[in-house]
Image: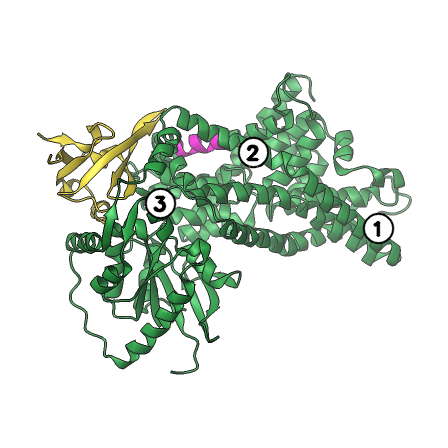
Amino acid sequence: MTAAIPTIALVGNPNAGKSSLFNALTGARQKIANYPGVTVERKAGQASFADGRPLSLVDLPGSYSLTPASPDEAVTRDVVLGQQAGERRPHALIVVVDAANLDNHLCFALELIALGLPTVVALNMLDLAERDGLTLDPAILSRELGVPVVPTVAVRKRGLADLLAAVDGAILSHQTQASTPSAPPPSDVALHQRARAIARAATLSETPVRRWTQRVDAVLLHPAHGFLILLALMFVMFQGVYAWSEAPIGWIEGGIAALQEAVTATLPDGFLRGLIIEGILGGVGSVIVFLPQILILFLFILLLEATGYMTRAAFLMDGIMAKVGLSGRGFIPLLSSFACAVPGIMATRAIPDAKDRLTTILIAPLMTCSARLPVYTLIIGAFIPNTNVGGSPVGLQGLVLFGLYLSGIVGALVVALVLRRTVAKGTAAGFMMEMPRYQWPRLRDVGIALWQRAWIFLRRAGTIIFVTTIALWLLLSYPKVPIDSSESQVDYSVAGRIASGLEVVVAPIGFNHDIALALIPAMAAREVAVSALATANAIEAGDDEEAMAQSLSERLQGRWSVATALAFLAWFVFAPQCISTIAITKRETNGWKWPLFMVGYLFALAYAAAGITYWTAVAFGLG
Amino acid sequence: MNAKLDSAPLGVAVRISRIDWDAMSHDEGRRLREFGLMEGIDVTPLHRGSLFSRDPLALSIGRMQVIIRARQAAMIEVAPTAP
């Protein structure tokens, strides 16, 4: 054998527990990238055999067969056939099957075994199968399939060493025997019959199916209260984002303030000190503060996915989504878009119908993503009183936030309805999907996924937000206002003058100079609006001790009317201010046509919504 | 008896007697077969729709549960399971 590190691919059906097995084998040593030319995620990691030799593991997208129905599944096929650009053909396959669903999962396993690569079958989630009343014999299964079968319980790390030993053995013995030419592929009906026969042979005893899952589903999928439970869950999620983030936000704010003081104490007054305190710490710090809220939101979404509830939510939502020409499939990408539209738009690849998918992509930015939270939080905190509605435990601030989320959803449904009758006309979308059984979420898997999201957010804060914040700080700081001028530094600066031009356009919808100034850099990312306001505020306060002591929200209260603040919130429900979203839309729709269309219609809606909000609020005396 | 799966009562196992493969697209048919939905197989309709709609349909097949639309279920003929 050469010294090259062997590459081993994990393949299997969706819901076979592939990712947990991958996490258990590689731990945190994973790298996520994209396959070249396509937007399918490539998850790779390192592990080692018992004697310490390293091996490289690749987690392939879940698939039902070697005949792909989506770009994800095409990558799986191409990798195992050795046709995927940027990926050598794996030296061996670990085929992951759900022990409790052999009838179905063995079909794909049989197809993969027929490829002739060294193959080991991981009989995964054996504990859950036993809970379901199934007793299986791995030895019989191994004999019928003609490859080693290793029982595994990824969550408890059971069977992992045996699995890798079997892979090692399979690679070694494979080198000594010539691979047999594979017979022509059997029809899918014949394949299923064979899979069922093998599953029957390997099943020693079996009791009626999944009583537990079905009992839970009787409640959660009930046409009426199942739906109410879904709404209640989402409400709790959005209240939780507020209530549980208060303390950690305080710690981060305290930390940034301490850093600013330390810099003030060590550096002399001048360009560098201004840049660090006002530009970097003030700007980037005002965005990092929102990490707790973003993590709480992602935690909810990851838990809903890990427990298997997300598919139930798709089931419950399919009826409504069908009415606007979408499918329940679109619910998962759209719910992910509440965290961030970029993974949401990428997740639309699971939607088989092209028009259905296009519509879902176009409305994904209307879901209130986590980048809007900084803006919403700042404005709500400054202008909406922190009281409860009536005598209830429901907070008014949380209620307004819920209303903003709801506006985005209703807006998205209306837009979808219009798009499906105009630019994205097509036949009614289909909806076919497997419903996984319920599982306790694995804390470790959720933890790893959460860490990956946090890292992506921090990297964004460290790059896009960092650069735009510094650029804005420079544009705001120069040229310096003459001592004898009555103008403020912000108004006199380059950025201030550009904003004055934009102000003419946005003045009718109640936007002031502050907002015009914040909107331009916020094209890069919505949350930059907050850091832009913070930076402008810091520069304007300058050395004025009293102004410095005021928080950003106190300053805004003095400068904005309630009507302006509400219009600003309404604007951000719709405004497509996110470079990443526009870029991913271009990539996923193969051209500039749809991203431009998206930006155009969203800005039009944002302007209209802000205008109507402002004029209504002024009419009610809030101007 | 030629009942269709879209109107079959919930919670009662039925056997698929015929599927109108020609009425659906190639991909649709293939995905149904990948789920194991084919002639001679027993399925149990479990849940139908929510507050606003009678779509979709969740059914169990073997130890798996899948969701399909009523439109596809209407292309699947079912008969009572053999006693």
Residue A140 in the image, given as x and y percentages of width and height: 23, 60
Residue at x 38% of width, y 56% of height = A61
Q: Are marks 1 and 3 in contact (CB under 8 Å)?
A: no
Q: Which amino acid, by three-letter code, is at mark 1? A: Glu
For label 2, the residue is: A238
- Could you tell me the amino acid type at mark 3? Arg
Q: Residue at x 62, y 29 (%)?
A: A567
What's the amino acid at mark 2? Phe
Instruction: Name the residue beneath numbered marker 3.
Output: A131
Marks 2 and 1 belong to one chain: yes
Pointers 2 and 3 within a single chain: yes
In the picture, the quarter occupied by the N terminus of chain A is bottom left
Residue A554 lies left or right of residue A344; in this view the side is right
- The green one among the chains is A
Which chain does the numbered disc 2 sit on? A
| Residue A520 horizontal side relative to residue A123, left or right | right
SS under mark 3: helix
Does residue A497 appear in this view?
no
Is A410 within the magenta? yes
**Which is more N-terminal, label 3 or label 1?**
3
Give the alpha-carbon distance from disc 2 to disc 1, as whole Å.
Answer: 34 Å
Please give the count of numbered marks on the rendered protein.
3
Element under disc 2: helix
Q: In the image as oriented, which residue stretches furthest toward the right?
A: A484
Quarter of the rendering containing residue A294: top right
Residue A473, position as x, y percentages in the image: 74, 51
